[in-house]
Structures are given as C-alpha cells and as structure tokens.
Image (cartoon, grey):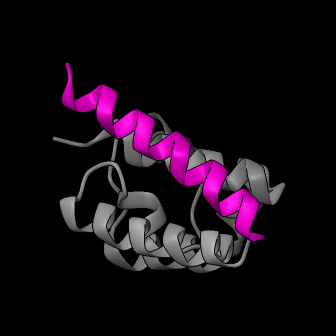
Amino acid sequence: MVDKRIGRRIKQYREKKGFTQEQLAEKIGVSTNYISAIERGAVFPRCENLIAILNSLEISANEIFVDVLVKAYEINASVLSEEIRTLPYEEQRRIFSVVETMIQEAKNK
C-alpha cells in the first residue's frame, strides 16, 4: 500500500523550493503526470526516482519518511536538539518549557 503522507511531504518540499510539478519532472526526467501521481499517493517512486527527487529538492530521506519510520523520529529529535542549541539561552528555555508541557499532556491522555 502506498503511504499518502510521503507524497504530501514531497509536494510540500517541492512547493517550498518553488518548483512546479513540471519543473521537478523535467529535472529528474519523468512526466508531470508521474510527479502528480506520487504527490497524490497513487504511486510510490522507484528508488532511482526517489533519490533524484530528494537531490533536486535538496532534502534528506528522513525529511520525507519522518512520519512513517520510527527511526526517523529519533534522527529528527537529534537534529532538532542540535538546532535548539544554536539559539540564545532564553529561547532554549522557552522551547524546552513548551516541549515539557506537551510531554506531560501526552502522558496524561
């Protein structure tokens, strides 16, 4: 079964990059219909096409699979932690306070 979340993520990053479906299709050598089908979740791209999409959009596989792979959450948490460390101390405290509150709320459900 094709996971529609992956297609939605590809679309999200394509739009963020400012590419049309036509432009992405041309970059990787496929049809616009194929890109549309991927983004709708109707098909899953072949491995070489997925790699070309990731490279064209300048993103990692983790950014596409974060919703579907358990390990991706661990990697994403690590990346977020590193990003937070680059912020001023007060901003770090504010972010961690929000996250701690969210964790407590999740545990209480």
Secondary structure mostly taken by the magenta-highlighted segment of the chain: helix
Q: Please state which of residues 46 and 58 is positioned toward the viewer in this rendering.
A: 58
Image position of 32 with respect to 71: above or below: above
What residue is drawn where x is 31% and y is 34%? 104
In which quarter of the view is residue 23 placed?
Answer: bottom right
Image position of 103 with respect to 80: above or below: above
In which quadrant will I find the C terminus? top left
- Asked if residue 104 is among those painted magenta in the image, a careful observer would answer yes
Question: As drawn, is 47 to the left or to the right of 89?
Answer: left
Q: Residue furthest right?
A: 18
In which quadrant will I find the N terminus? top left
What residue is drawn where x is 55% and y is 70%? 53
Residue 35 percent across, percent down from the top left: 55, 50
In which quarter of the view is residue 27 placed?
Answer: bottom right
Write the start and end of the magenta stretch as one range. 88-109
What residue is drawn where x is 60% and y is 46%? 11
Question: As drawn, is 50 to the left or to the right of 18?
Answer: left
